[in-house]
Amino acid sequence: MGGTGMRPASKLLTALCLALGSSAALANDPGVTDTEIVVGGFVPFTGPAGLLGYAGTLGSRIAAAEINDRGGVNGRKINLIVEDDEYVPAKSVQAMQKLIDVHDIFAMTSVSGGSHGLAVMPMIEEHNIPTINPLVTTDAHFEPARASFFGIGMSYQQGVIDLVRFVDATEDGLTWGSIVQDDESGIPREEGLDTVLAELGKEAVLKQRFKRGQADFAAEVLRAREAGVDAIVLGGLPAQNAAILKEAKKIGYAPKFGAVWMDHIPQVIDLYGPEGDGVYVYDFVPSMTDERLKPFLELANKYLPAEDVPKLNRYSIIAYTGMKVHAAAMEACGKELTRACEIENLKKIRDFDAGFMAPLSFGEDVRLTDLKGSVLRVDHAAGAFVAVE
């Protein structure tokens, strides 16, 4: 007999070794089977940031349902799992650990906040988890470029720069100030104000910072009035910004107020109340009443329970886009889907258009998209954000 023959027992042993080798290879990239890809995230569903986090999850769900309806990603269906971190960094770490250890995720589709993202970043980097965050544009997440962490939007600094340029041109001699949260979300807005005022040959008259969770802004508003500030950059969560507006109204103080995209959600108009009429808001996402979003709302009505449709906002649009980008990068890997492959394909994304916001691009060292926005203004009587630029 020739020397290439094998006994049945040897053939069985070889087959078992090959099977075990295949399983070991799969273990290096969790969350992928022949039939599904597990994508996870953590956001707040409750509390001051709950309107943002839950709406983002809805956008991801719409995209995942649409992708799955069309056959999935190379035949694999998206299994979306999102944990509630209540907007508490310590709970963000717990949620991330659960996503890795219990849910065995392949990729991440949402991270709730600036400090929350930094708290879990070591875990994301250790496991090389492809992450696209539609909720936060904190510089520390993206500069310097991290291997697997991507974001959709623009920096808070640039948003404030564009906003102030526009508002400052509406009236001669405006004096500027800011009231921002003392964290990775608020401080960049203060920095953006400093940058644009230097460009305009001005300086901020008064810059004030407050701690997370603060609810009483009587002192800050009074100081701004006494300093003669007649244009203010707001840098808190919507509920805090609303409290500042109401305090100003209470003492008869009427400066121009400017905010960025965090306040561009329909519920904010009621939260602001009449005191918010005329507030400028800068965003790179169209208003939910914009004609361009009709097809998105049709998808929402198709894939969401009726009670969830009114909860959609701008974060739903970005999260939808983020999930579609994930799917495009995964699909380019073919059947041999690995984290490393998806990350390489994300870096190659150029002018990706999901249909509802400006096309976006990444690059070898570009992790946060550079999108152009526009200025809106709150029309309380109409219950809408009206484009003014």
Image (cartoon, rainbow, N blue to C red):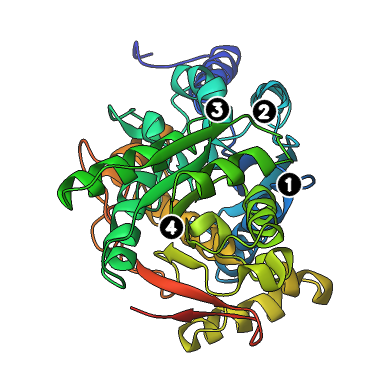
Q: Which residue is mark 2?
A: 92
Quadrant where the image shows the N terminus: top left
Query: Mark 2 vs mark 1: which is more N-terminal?
Result: 1
When asked about the image quadrant of residue 368, the answer is top left
Q: Which mark is residue 230?
A: 4
Marks 2 and 4: in contact by CB < 8 Å? no
Observer-nearest of 138 and 365: 138
Amino acid tagged 4? Asp
Asked whether, in this view, residue 43 is left or right of residue 154, the answer is right
Q: Residue furthest right?
A: 307
- The Cα atoms of the two marked residues, 4 and 3, are separated by 31 Å
- The Cα atoms of the two marked residues, 4 and 2, are separated by 38 Å
Provide residue 295's location: percent of width, then percent of height.
53, 84
Instruction: Give the mark toward the camera: 1 or 3.
Output: 1
Q: Mark 4 packing: few (<14 Cα in 10 Å), some, or many (20+)?
A: some
Amino acid tagged 2? Ser
Observer-nearest of 124 and 307: 307
Q: Which residue is mark 1?
A: 48
- The Cα atoms of the two marked residues, 2 and 1, are separated by 16 Å
Asked whether, in this view, residue 299 is left or right of residue 102, the answer is left
Provide residue 31's location: percent of width, then percent of height.
59, 35
Secondary element type, mark 4: loop
Q: Mark 3 packing: few (<14 Cα in 10 Å), some, or many (20+)?
A: many
